[in-house]
């Protein structure tokens, strides 16, 4: 296993007296895709919000490269940890306006070449830069959202079911995009999904969550061949509904 | 006509009672058509009567005082009342009471001081209280509309705000489209009133002056000053209310505050 870049250590989180996450611990390694797998309501999306502090986590539970995230400036943290929502919202304007959004917040104006490079990195044509976002397809929107996050040069990317709203072809393109980014840029990725076939295609490491608790974790071989009981039931439940 | 010797100022009150016949007609219509608003009309009519008679006496009292502090005190009380009314639109927003009080106060102080500095009006009770009242009333509406719009838009557009926050935007940057819209929408009634003045209806100040026997062209000048000062007051109140208000939707760690944004 490579060097852990993100450590989650005995994380408990409750909202309005309802326990959402209980004693969650796992590591995500540099340059790898860690997939958080589980049914709806298992706390996967909350996990992502806590990592980049859109929701405040308890102190001492989430460590990014050896630093407790609650001690970091939240704005700087969010530039280091990009979050792509399940249904991203693109700001009114062109694709290029959206990609330039993050750097502009801190006074950096990306050149046309950089914008083209980011579009290429997410397997989109650089010619799309001047297109108004209203004309994009679902798959294009998702990849523009990823390019927009990449523009901040993050070290870690959090993906919240990025392919759920996409057709299989567009979903494959997003998977390829992310796999390429991990291999070529050494990007660390936490990817929330409930799609077992997708897990088999892209995961380096799997963390299986059920009702806010980590029921099993390991690499593909460990998880699918050793067949942890709860994970096995979950996989079968989805494959043969 | 009954002469009320004990209350010489109210000798014309019979006209008020006569006008109440019109409310009686409205009550009749409500009853006839089962609109079921008779009770509210009774209460509103009675409240208007009592409140206005009371304020009439208060004004008589203050106009008789020499000291300027009385004027300031009266405006302060009116400002508190305006803030308390406006705050109802901001229920659920932390510190909404202070926000409405400060923003209405700032809008009124800036506008009144400008009117005084430009020597448009003089600092006396007869001028300051009615003019201040008009500014406060208009600012009250602006503050209420601003808070209401902030509340609605933060709920409706919370995913847009979170998208911006997730990309590293500070709360000011993430909230800018929302507070700009809030100021804009809160200023629309004042700007529209100025746009249509004289075409659609003759506004209150001008009507009052003409009824009191002031020549129309003089009344028109006062009305123009009133319209312009209300635009200024709306801008300052809306700006103050929006800038103080949007911060209440965020935590110190630049997150949307769940208790405010996610409440039902």
Image: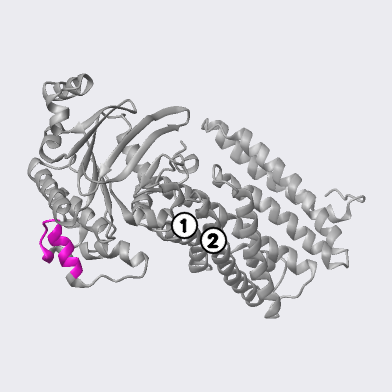
Q: Which residue is mark 1?
A: B182
Residue drawn at x 58%, y 62% as measured from the top left: B237
Q: CA distance from mark 1 to mark 2?
A: 8 Å
For the question of whether residue B108 can be seen, the reply is yes
Residue drawn at x 13%, y 37% as measured from the top left: A198
Q: Quadrant of residue A204?
A: top left
Callout 1 touching callout 2 (CB < 8 Å): yes
Side of A33 where B11 appears, left or right: right
For the question of whether residue B215 can be seen, the reply is no
Of labels 1 and 2, earlier in sequence is 1
Please, which residue is most extreme toward the bottom here?
A: B118
- The quarter in which the N terminus of chain A is drawn is top left
- Chain letter of mark 2 equals B
Q: Position of residue A85 (x, y in %)?
A: 27, 46
Q: Say yes or no: labels 1 and 2 on the same chain.
A: yes
Please, which residue is most extreme toward the left here?
A: A169
Q: Is residue B84 above or below residue B120?
A: above
Q: Which structural element holds mark 2?
A: helix
Q: Which residue is mark 2?
A: B238
By what rule are the colours in the image chosen?
Answer: one colour
Q: Is residue A230 above or below residue A172?
A: above
In magenta segment, residue B161: no
Side of A167 where A189 appears, left or right: right
Q: Quadrant of residue B101?
A: bottom right
Stretch in magenta? A114-127
């Amino acid at each position: 296993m490579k060097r852990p870049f993100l450590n989650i250590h005995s994380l408990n989180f409750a909202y309005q007296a309802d326990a959402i996450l209980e004693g969650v611990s796992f590591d995500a390694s540099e340059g790898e895709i860690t997939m958080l797998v589980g049914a709806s309501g298992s706390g996967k999306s909350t996990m992502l919000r806590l990592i980049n502090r859109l929701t405040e986590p308890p102190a001492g539970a989430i460590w990014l490269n050896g630093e407790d995230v609650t001690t970091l400036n939240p704005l700087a943290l969010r530039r280091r940890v990009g979050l792509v929502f399940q249904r991203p919202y693109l700001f009114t304007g062109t694709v290029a306006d959206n990609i330039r959004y993050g750097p502009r917040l801190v006074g950096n104006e990306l050149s046309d070449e950089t914008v083209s490079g980011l579009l290429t990195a997410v397997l989109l044509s650089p010619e799309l830069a001047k297109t108004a976002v209203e004309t994009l397809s679902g798959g294009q929107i998702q990849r523009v959202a990823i390019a927009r996050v990449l523009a901040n040069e993050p070290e870690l990317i959090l993906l919240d079911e990025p392919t759920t709203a996409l057709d299989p072809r567009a979903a494959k393109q997003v998977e390829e995009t992310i796999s390429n980014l991990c291999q070529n840029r050494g990007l660390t990725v936490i990817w929330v999904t409930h799609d077992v076939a997708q897990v088999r295609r892209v995961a380096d490491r799997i963390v299986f969550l059920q009702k806010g608790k980590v029921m099993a974790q390991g690499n593909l071989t460990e998880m699918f061949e050793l067949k942890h009981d709860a994970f096995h039931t979950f996989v079968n439940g989805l494959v043969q509904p | 006509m009954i002469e009320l010797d004990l209350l010489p100022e109210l000798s014309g009150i019979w006209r008020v009672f006569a006008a109440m016949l019109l409310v009686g007609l409205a009550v009749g219509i409500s009853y006839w058509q089962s609109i079921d608003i008779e009770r509210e009309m009774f209460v509103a009519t009675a409240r208007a009567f009592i409140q206005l008679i009371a304020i009439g006496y208060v004004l008589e009292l203050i106009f008789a005082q020499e000291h300027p502090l009385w004027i300031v005190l009266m405006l302060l009380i009116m400002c508190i009342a305006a803030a308390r009314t406006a705050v109802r639109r901001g229920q659920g927003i932390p510190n909404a009471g202070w926000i409405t009080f400060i923003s209405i106060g700032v809008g009124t102080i800036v506008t009144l001081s400008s009117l005084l500095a430009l020597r448009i009006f003089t600092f006396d009770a007869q001028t300051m209280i009615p003019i201040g009242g008009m500014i406060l009333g208009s600012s009250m509406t602006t503050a209420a509309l601003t808070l209401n719009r902030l509340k609605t838009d933060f709920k409706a557009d919370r995913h847009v705000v979170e998208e911006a926050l997730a990309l590293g935007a500070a709360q000011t940057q993430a909230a800018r489209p929302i507070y700009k819209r809030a100021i804009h929408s809160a200023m629309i009634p004042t700007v529209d009133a100025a746009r249509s003045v004289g075409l659609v209806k003759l506004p209150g100040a001008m009507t009052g002056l003409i009824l009191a026997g002031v020549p129309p062209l003089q009344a028109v000048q006062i009305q123009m000053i009133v319209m312009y000062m209300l635009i200024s007051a709306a801008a300052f109140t809306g700006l103050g209310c929006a800038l103080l208000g949007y911060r209440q939707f965020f935590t110190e760690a630049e997150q949307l505050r769940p208790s405010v944004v996610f409440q039902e």
